Image: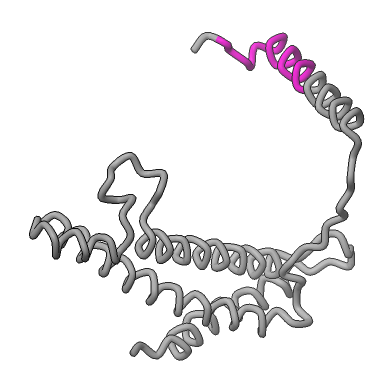
């Protein structure tokens, strides 16, 4: 078993020092503007979270198959691949099973590493930056949503017209 805690610590200690230096060089008193160090820390956290989701998805697809894949062999679950090989003795089922096994191991290893990285970042970020930016949830009526879309569309058209007048937009593609 890999010692992911030590690997993560070595790498993220370097990141942490960089984030702190960037923060000191670019910090501001404006509560709406974060420092570059805080932005980099938040970006790394988001990247790690996406990687966790990606590898979790990879494990799920490797175990259960991909129901949206046009090829039948990719829609089969891991257990079904084993069963098909046992009943037919066709090598491509065994090859597919081996590929899935390697994919599972790879995703599992990456997932363990990324979970350690996420925990490290969360621990470091306490008091340094909010990793989850608070957002105001608003519920709009269908009418107000349509008005907003129309307004944004009109702004875009005006912007395009301005670029055309200046010769900066060529629609010949």
- Which residue occupies the foreground of this view, 142 or 132? 142
- Considering every residue shown, the one lying at the far front of the view is 87
Give x and y (percent) for residue 74.
30, 50
Give x and y (percent) for residue 76.
31, 54
- What sort of colour scheme is used for the picture? one colour
Give x and y (percent) for residue 136.
87, 55
Tell me if residue 167 is in the magenta stretch.
yes
Residue 86 position by quadrant? bottom left
- Residue at coordinates 33% horizontally, 69% vertically from top-left? 104
- Which residue occupies the foreground of this view, 169 or 44? 44
Q: The magenta stretch spans which residues?
A: 156-171
Per the picture, the main secondary structure of the magenta-coloured stretch is helix
Q: Is residue 116 left or right of residue 165?
A: left
Tell me if residue 166 is in the magenta stretch.
yes
- Residue at coordinates 72% horizontally, 72% vertically from top-left? 23
Give x and y (percent) for residue 93.
17, 57
Q: Is residue 74 left or right of residue 12?
A: left
Q: Could you tell me which quadrant the N terminus lies in?
A: bottom left
- Residue at coordinates 74% horizontally, 66% vertically from top-left? 132
Q: Is residue 171 above or below residue 56?
A: above
Q: Is residue 73 left or right of residue 116?
A: left
Residue 92 position by quadrant? bottom left
- Residue at coordinates 89% horizontally, 48% vertically from top-left? 138
Q: Is residue 15 above or below residue 67?
A: below
- Which residue occupies the foreground of this view, 80 or 48? 80
Residue 2 position by quadrant? bottom left
Tell me how many marks there are: 0
Q: Is residue 65 above or below residue 156?
A: below
């Amino acid at each position: 078993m890999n010692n992911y805690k030590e690997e993560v610590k070595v790498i993220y200690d370097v990141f942490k020092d960089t984030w702190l230096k960037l923060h000191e060089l670019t910090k501001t008193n404006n509560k709406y503007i974060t420092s570059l160090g805080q932005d980099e820390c938040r970006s790394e956290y988001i990247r790690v979270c996406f990687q966790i989701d990606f590898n979790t998805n990879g494990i799920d697809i490797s175990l259960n198959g991909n129901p949206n894949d046009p090829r039948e062999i990719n829609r089969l679950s891991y257990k079904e691949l084993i069963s098909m090989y046992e009943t037919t003795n066709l090598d491509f089922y065994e090859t597919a099973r081996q590929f899935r096994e390697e994919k599972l191991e790879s995703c599992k290893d990456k997932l363990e590493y990324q979970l350690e990285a996420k925990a490290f970042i969360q621990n470091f970020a306490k008091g340094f930056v909010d990793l989850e930016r608070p957002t105001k949830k608003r519920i709009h009526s269908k009418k107000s949503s349509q008005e907003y879309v129309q307004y944004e569309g009109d702004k875009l058209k005006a912007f395009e017209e301005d670029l055309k007048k200046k010769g900066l937009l060529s629609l010949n593609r």
